Structures are given as C-alpha cells and as structure tokens.
Amino acid sequence: MSTSPQALLAALGELIDPNTGKSYADARAVRAATLEGGHAEITVELGYPAASQFGAIAAQLEAAARALPGVRSARATVGSKVVAHAVQGNVKLLPGVKNIIAVSSGKGGVGKSTTAVNLALALAREGARVGLLDADIYGPSQPQMLGIASAQPESEDGKTMLPLEAHGIQANSIGFLIDPEQPMVWRGPMVTQALRQLLFETRWKDLDYLVIDMPPGTGDIQLTLAQTVPVTGAVIVTTPQDIALLDARKGLKMFEKVGIPLLGVVENMSIHVCSNCGHAEHIFGAGGGEALCADYGVPFLGALPLDIRIRSQTDAGQPTVVAEPDGAIAAAYGDIARKVGVAVAEKQRDMRLRFPTIVVNKD
C-alpha cells in the first residue's frame, strides 16, 4: 500500500516545528507536497527568519516522508517569508518597513544598545532584511557600535535620508548628523521631533524588521512611539538585580498601557565566567528575568553573559554576532533573534496592505 499525496501532506503537517513547539499545519507552513514515482517533493515556508535551522528542518521533513509506505526518497526545500503584522491602534504602517521592534529598558546601564545591535545583526544572519534606528537622542551609540561613526547619510531629493549600511543592515542615528562631542541640550518636544524625522524621513528599503534602540526610561520618546509609530512589539532588556528589575517592571507596564505587545524579556549580564580560572558567578543575582516573566506572563527570550568580549567587540565596531559568528555568545543572540521572529510571526497579520484605499470624490 502506497501513500497518497494527501496522506503525505497530512503526515508532514503533524510534525512539530522545533522553533515554535507547534505543528507545521497550525502555522500553514507546508506549502506543497507532491509524490511521484516514490519520490516526495516538499516545500515549507516559515513565517520567521531561521536560515541556520533550514537544514535541520529539511532533514526532519525528509525523514518523516521516507518513513511512509511507498516513499523511497524525499527532498524538502525550506525557506521563510516575513509579513507585516498588526500594530497598536490605527497607526499607519511605515513605508518600506513590515515590522517594528522596540528594544527598551527601564534604566540605563543594562546593555540595551548592545543587545539591540546584536539582535538586529542576528535577525539579518537568519535571513531577514533588517534596519536599526538609534532613538537614544541624548546618547547615540550605534554609530560607534556599527563601526561607521564618521559616516553621514546622503539625500537624493533634499527631503529624505538614505540609511547607511553596515554588516548587512541599514541604520540611521542622530549620531550621524552631529559632532560626537556635542551634547544634545534639547527639551522633550525637540527630541520627539528629531525621532520623528529620523524615523519617517529615512527611506528604509524593504525591511522585514526595523529594530529601534530606545532611550532608557518611560518619557517623551516612549509616549511618541506609542502614539505615532507602528510598533509590532517590544523587547525589554534587564539585568537580574532587583534595582534593574524594578525599572523593567515599569517599562513593561508602560507598553501594556499603550497597547504595544511584549515580545519578551532578555536578561543581560546574567552570569560572569572568569577568563583566567573559569569560575562562574552570578554577580547581579540569579533568575530575576525569569521571575519577572513569570509574574507578568511574558516570554523569557534568553540570558546573556557578562563577558569582556561583548564590550570590546562592540566598542571596536564589530559586535559579537559579526566578530565571532560561530561562538557561543553569537549562538545565544541567534536563539533570542529566532524567538523574537517567532513571537512576531504569531501576532495577527496586518491586512491593510491587501486592500486598496478607496477615495470618494464629489463632483
């Protein structure tokens, strides 16, 4: 007895995606499954970037197909396609950008900017088209972290800016437009206007994700973001210590109040391993990020170590995901990036792109 194409499709749909914990059928990921002469051809399209996982997923599908009666060989083609997802309220989508991810923290000094740049680079490494906006107007650090501090964006029309590119991602920052030693002595309205100009007057080029490196706190920029910027979801960065967690809780509640979904929490500086003796120590405490997630029902995206290489590499303009792409720390960033991609993919899709805008003119 041989397997029918319908039975093949059903069997593959029951398999569990290792990145989501859900079946491929639930995600409607199996796009095609044909069977001819005992050979199965399978096409799977994931809703999140996971280029590093394509080989393992293909092997999973091929093994399952070959286990069916009458199937002698199988070939699976795995890819991904990121679509636009719903945002808060009736905020209009940003041209050239499918999804916006805000990376935030309740307080400074927890490694938010370092996490943001490595998250953006990890998403790009998984196959996504990614941009990075440095929204920390008072203390822009992304130009230095990306190694392009001396560059300036160009304008083709005198009205909009072209994003700069570094390590395969697009980027813009107030740091590209001012003297790096010039203090930004601006009041709130000027800061929010600068953010709006950077965001809406940059010609982002067909991005799957725009990662926004937010300033710390819950002030004017966060309110502007909630009211006018189409944010798909937010990521909170914290350290395990109680003081940082107090402020992280405020940031988390702020996003809840303004209707921006929480994609999850990243615990930075989770553990320190001595580079000389190998002794591991939780300098800032242990389990704080996971406890925060448990209290609020928010996903825990992962923990990152307190490691001198992360600091030295970003200072040199070569963030860890670029400097040591095959290292353990880059793998941790990659795991967090895939979880963020999955969290976005599971949000409701934005259907406005599928319908034309209808305008009624009175004669």
Image (spheres, rainbow, N blue to C red):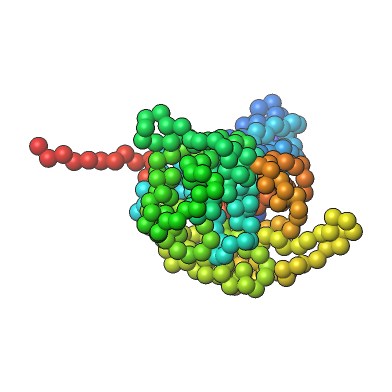
The residue positioned farthest toward the right in the image shown: 277
Position of 321 with respect to 356 (left or right) is: right
Residue 118 at x, y percent in the picture: 64, 47
Residue 294: x and y, percent? 62, 70
Which image quarter holds the N terminus? top right
Q: Residue at x 45, y 63 (%)?
A: 219
Asked whether the viewer can see residue 25, the reply is no
The answer to whether 143 is drawn above or below residue 216 in the figure is: above
Say whether residue 48 is left or right of residue 60: left
Q: Relative to 355, is 268 on the left or the right?
A: right
- What's the residue at 40%, 40% (across, down)? 201
Say which residue appears at 48% left-offset and 65% top-offset.
Answer: 218
Residue 285: which quarter of the image? bottom right
- Which residue lies most toward the top here? 37
Residue 115 showing in the rendered view: yes
Residue at the far left in the pictured view: 363
Give 319 or 18, whichever is nearer the viewer: 319
Q: x, y (%) of residue 233? A: 50, 55
- Image label count: 0
Q: Is residue 246 above or below residue 325?
A: below
Residue depicted at x 9% and y 37%: 363
Q: Nearer the viewer, residue 209 or 223?
A: 223
> Residue 284: horizontal and vertical position, in percent?
72, 68
- Rendered image quadrant of residue 109: bottom right
